[in-house]
Amino acid sequence: MRTLIPLVLINLFACQSAFSQEMIQGNIDQGEIVPLDTTFWDISAQAHVFERYEGKDAIYIQEGFATLKETKFLNGTIEFDVYLTERQAFPGVRFRADDGGNMESFYLRPHLSGKPDGNQAVPVINGISAWQLYFGPAYSFAYEYQFDGWTHVKLVIHDRRAQVYLDYSETPHLSWNLKHAPREGLVAIGGSFAPMHYADFRIDTNSMEIIDFHVVETEPVEGAISEWEISSKFEEALLSNPEKIEGLIDTVHWKGKIRIEENSAANVSWVATRYGTPGNTVFARLRVESDRDQLKLFEFGYSDRVVAIVNGRAIYKGNNKWRTRDYRYLGTIGLFDAIYVPLVKGENTILLAVSEDFGGWGVMGRFENQDGLQLR
């Protein structure tokens, strides 16, 4: 389930085509198959081969992407075929991609055929593919894949709405709301881990009809903290000495507040990125006014690691990273951890120092019993 974004950030915009926009755009406006060659595609992968495979002209991509040259996609239909194997892999499509690592994506998990997380719709925000934050039936569905023939993938995108159809289904398998505001961007096919063959890629910018749009609602967490104040980023190693944490707090600046989303979590990636400058950790700050000295249970979730700090003192350290608890552990966010917080009368500051590797940078929390508390 490794993220593919660093590869995209480095390579998605690296090559400049010598061919005109009109030449390429004319082949896709009406949904014609786009030839798989370097005239139309920039390839950024460990390896690739153009070849005839199982009756189709195909490209075999290992650990990387093929990006359609000089084509800015906003609304329409994207279709392609992929020849799946049962090996662990994440073949799919990225669309509306910009050079800041922002895009929307959908990919398959063929090694999880028939399981509820057999695929994934997920935004990429400032270089981070946040599948640990956006998960469950609102973003994936169970599907029995075939491994002896081509799988057809069709996406229909219109403004903030998207739908996916597999194997020429007449009804969508998944409908979801896109996280980014609609804007034109590049389109790429590819993936990581096991290589895959792709064929018959086409875009039809005139076909964007959304039908039977039904989004699976995510149940919000009752009493969840509605917004968090996020600091500038810093290196996680600076948390290693708890005696120096108060000094570290004084060195950061505060970038502003982010509100939680439908999953009751705040996505740190909206205001921070892992890439470009050093630092993989931020403070998420909550101010609490207590009417007396008291001990309160505070439930929280995070991705990927956390140090909890109350009034300048570190009191908890946790790890929720992918595969840290068993080989199938996903590291998805939820209220899986809790601490008893020693609050003093007056104002208290709770900091969650949240560190990110990949899969989503997030934080959430709540006081189940808020008697005597005022949250700022």
Image (spheres, grey):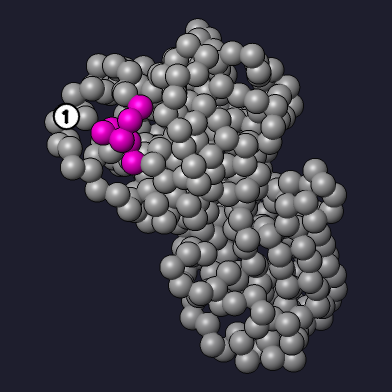
Q: So how many labels did they put on this image?
A: 1
Q: Residue furthest top?
A: 170
Name the amino acid type tagged 1: Met
In the image: residue 237, left or right of residue 127: right
Res 289 → quadrant? bottom right
- Check the picture and name the quadrant holding the C terminus: bottom right
The residue lying at 42 percent from left, 54 percent from top is: 9
Residue 304 sits above or below residue 332 on the image: below
Q: Which residues are magenta?
A: 36-42
Q: Visible in this render: residue 96?
A: no
Measured from the top left, where is residue 20 in percent x and y?
15, 36
Residue 274 belongs to the span the image colors magenta:
no
Measured from the top left, where is residue 246 in percent x and y?
66, 89
Q: Which residue is mark 1?
A: 23
Label 1 neighbour load within 10 Å: few <14, some 14-19, many 20+: few
Q: Visible in this render: residue 184?
A: yes
The residue lying at 60 percent from left, 71 percent from top is: 281
Front position in the image: 324 or 262? 324
In the image: residue 35, left or right of residue 168: left
In the image: residue 266, left or right of residue 316: left
Measured from the top left, where is residue 251 in percent x and y?
54, 88
The residue lying at 16 percent from left, 29 percent from top is: 23
- The dominant secondary structure in magenta is loop
Residue 286 sits above or below residue 141 on the image: below
Residue 177 sits above or below residue 84 on the image: below
Measured from the top left, where is residue 294 in percent x and y?
83, 76
The residue lying at 59 percent from left, 13 percent from top is: 149
